[in-house]
Image (cartoon, rainbow, N blue to C red):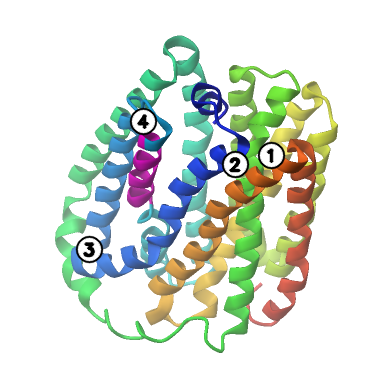
Amino acid sequence: FPLWQSQFGLAFSGVGLLKMLFHGTLAFLQVPSSYAARRFGAVRMLLAGTLLTSAAAVAYGWASTPLLLGFLLIAGGMGASVQHPLSSSLLSDAFPGVEQRRAALSVFNVSGDIGKLVFPASAALLIGQVGWPQASRTMGFFGIAVTVVLAWLTRPLARGEAGVTSSGAGRGAKASVLRGNTAFGALVGIGILDNATRVGFLTYFPFLLRDKGADIAVVGLALSLIFSGGIAGKFVCGILATRAGVLRSVLITECLTGIFIWSAISLPLNAVLPLCPLLGIALNGTSSVLYGSVPELVTQEQRSRSFAVFYTASIGSGAVSPLVYGVVSDILGLVPTLVVIGALVFTTAPLVMPLRGKLAG
């Protein structure tokens, strides 16, 4: 984003708009993706989505105007929209036990953060050597190659899922997962605030580092440290939620998130880097707890749609927040906006109360 800001002469609101185009498309196509999976199969949809996102990444490197880049980000978001609800639903069906399901969803979330750990560091290295357009094309072609391999490996699943995904497709599909379900509504509210904080902060954190004197390589290192902490946080918090309790885990991680964000604002660059892994643990750890709680608050027939609703709301907030915070940054400045982002996370505390007695652990 700092590179795009510099190349295209964007204000912070323009950066936020680009971020919103990708994440907004990703968020608001998740419910349609869950319906499409009933017709075409979840595995096929996952492969097609990964292929589309990778192809969009290849094309980013040829984007010569912000308008063209915006259209390509929308295409990438369309492909990415299938990932969260379909994968989570497949895992929930495969692991009916609460502890096994939480562990499986934690591993799933960790696998995503492994990519977030490796790709920023690889991108920073490639950008330093060949520039961002060629780096984007290289990583996009890598994604296409991986998708081809996955398509070959998952052929038996793709052939056998048609009958499974169509069976019971209509059962419970029309019933609202939010109507009368206060606990699920509270969980969605926590997800909205948590994701708005995480995406908003990570969008503008590189600009904070730049203002502290960091170059692109240091920014890539800092993001990799955050995501490495996120790997540990998502896995450990997902497991510990079954032992220490879901509510306690959410409260602790959200409070630590706000404290660490404010610390990153006030500390010098050489002190921010050691803080990044701890920030990643707090910033990303809550998500495993929230994702793993969805199946416990709805019926089995509602799982696929419930995950789609949850991800639409939470990721949708993350899509809108960069634009909102970008406008605020243009008016108030970057640091005051980051202070507000850190404060927002504490508003999740009241939403924990409706979950009492509703969740195992």
Q: Which residue is mark 2?
A: 13
Residue sitting nearer the eye, 155 or 262: 262
Q: Can residue 77 be found in the magenta stretch?
A: yes
Q: Residue at x 31, y 31 (%)?
A: 59
Identify the image quadrant of the N terminus: top right
Q: Residue 335 appears at what percent x and percent y?
A: 78, 37
Find the magenta span and give its range: 68-80
As drawn, 317 above or below 58: below
Q: Which residue is mark 4?
A: 60
Residue 41 bears which disc, if any?
Answer: 3
Identify the image quadrant of the C terminus: bottom right
- Numbered disc 4: secondary structure: helix
As drawn, 45 above or below 304: above
**Of the residues tagged 3 and 4, which is closer to the observer?**
4
Q: Residue 32 appears at what percent x and percent y?
A: 33, 66
Question: Disc 4 marks which amino acid?
Answer: Tyr
